[in-house]
Amino acid sequence: MVKKQSNFQPLKILAMLMIVSHHLVSKNAFNVDTEIVGLTTNKLLLQILGNNAFIGNNLFFLISAWFLSSKAEDSINLKYSFSSCVRLERIVLFYSISLLCLSLIFNRGGGVSLTLVLKSIFPTLFGLWWYPTTYIVFLLMWPFYHKGLKTLDDDNLKKCIVVMFGVWSISTLIPYVDLGSNNFSAFLMLYAVVVYIKRKRITYSSYEKQCAGVIIIPYFLAILSIIVLDVLGIRLNAAATYSCYYLRGNFRPVSMLVSIGIFIWGVSWKIKYDRWINYIANATFGVYLIHMYPTVMKYLFSDVFDLSKYIDKNYCIFYLMYGTMTIFLLGIIIDTLREGIFCAAEKLRKLIVIRE
């Protein structure tokens, strides 16, 4: 069996760590933006480290888009899309039903509403987790979208990306402006970008200054906006509410540009096959599903990792890192067990088929 290189796997791990740290801050019972008046070191660091999930979300999708766009033309069809959706849905259903049952057992029904039961039985249909729902919808549209992009020459593909970026990303710099920017439109933009990167053979070494600029400049401006709005929040509470506005959203220019820059950098890595890196990276989707299940999220971010107890401590940021790593590693272990169950079930299925 040919072993694939591990180029993209560290990016998947980085992306999931960004996502977990964000949820540890944004979903916490303690609201960092509004419950700390003014600007403090801990507040600023929590706002920065706790709002990288949207970059992580985009990185996760960019990696998937790279492999999707690498498929042979004759395999880019609805049959492949449906099979991919089924594989994904199996994992999603496993976690939604398992976590629902565990919630009913340990919470004795407390915190488990009828809505959550319905969402757990039909997780994709009712959007229990936004990412797999959006990704499955994208997969169903993907064969047609990919073939449409292939008909565009380089110049028109670039113009298409610029228009999408202007309409769905740049426009969101103005609060309350809504031109259809959402997670799905972000996926459409990012896929077109990946097609363009592959077609033009864009590498970090060829565009080192541009990539560095795309990563550093928007991120620096976003941090500057946090500082300004935090200071304004001393006199105007509404300003504090919007302090992280320019970092929050998969379609925001900062999230889009920084994730694309990091991705191009990652494409240039030459990492040989590493069993442990691949092992951890392949379990990251399970980490997302586990810690974002509503009852698990409430338990983790309201009861276990309550930031209000550490917000005035010098080691607050280290506590955030500790919480992030703890959730991440536990998720990896649980998803490894899930993979073992799936492998055992598949072997049993094959054994039954052979006997029949």
Image: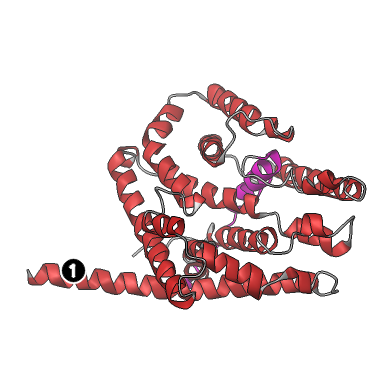
- Report the magenta stretch's main SS: helix
On the rendered structure, is 316 left or right of 59?
Answer: right
At label 1, which amino acid type do we have? Lys
Query: What number of labels is visible?
Result: 1
Q: Height in image: 225 above or below 26?
A: above
Q: Work out whether residue 272 can be spotted.
A: no
Q: Residues within 10 Å of mark 1 (few under 14, many from 20)?
A: few
Q: Nearer the viewer, residue 215 or 43?
A: 43
On the rendered structure, is 220 left or right of 305?
Answer: right
Q: Position of residue 272 (x, y in %)?
A: 52, 64
Judging by the rendered image, the residue that carries numbered circle 1 is 350
Snapshot quadrant of residue 210: top right
SS class of the residue under badge 1?
Answer: helix
Q: Which residues are magenta?
A: 252-275
Q: Nearer the viewer, residue 64 or 93?
A: 93
Q: Height in image: 100 above or below 140?
A: below
Q: Position of residue 171 (x, y in %)?
A: 68, 30
Magenta stretch holds residue 254: yes
Q: Position of residue 33 (x, y in %)?
A: 78, 55
Q: Nearer the viewer, residue 313 or 317?
A: 313
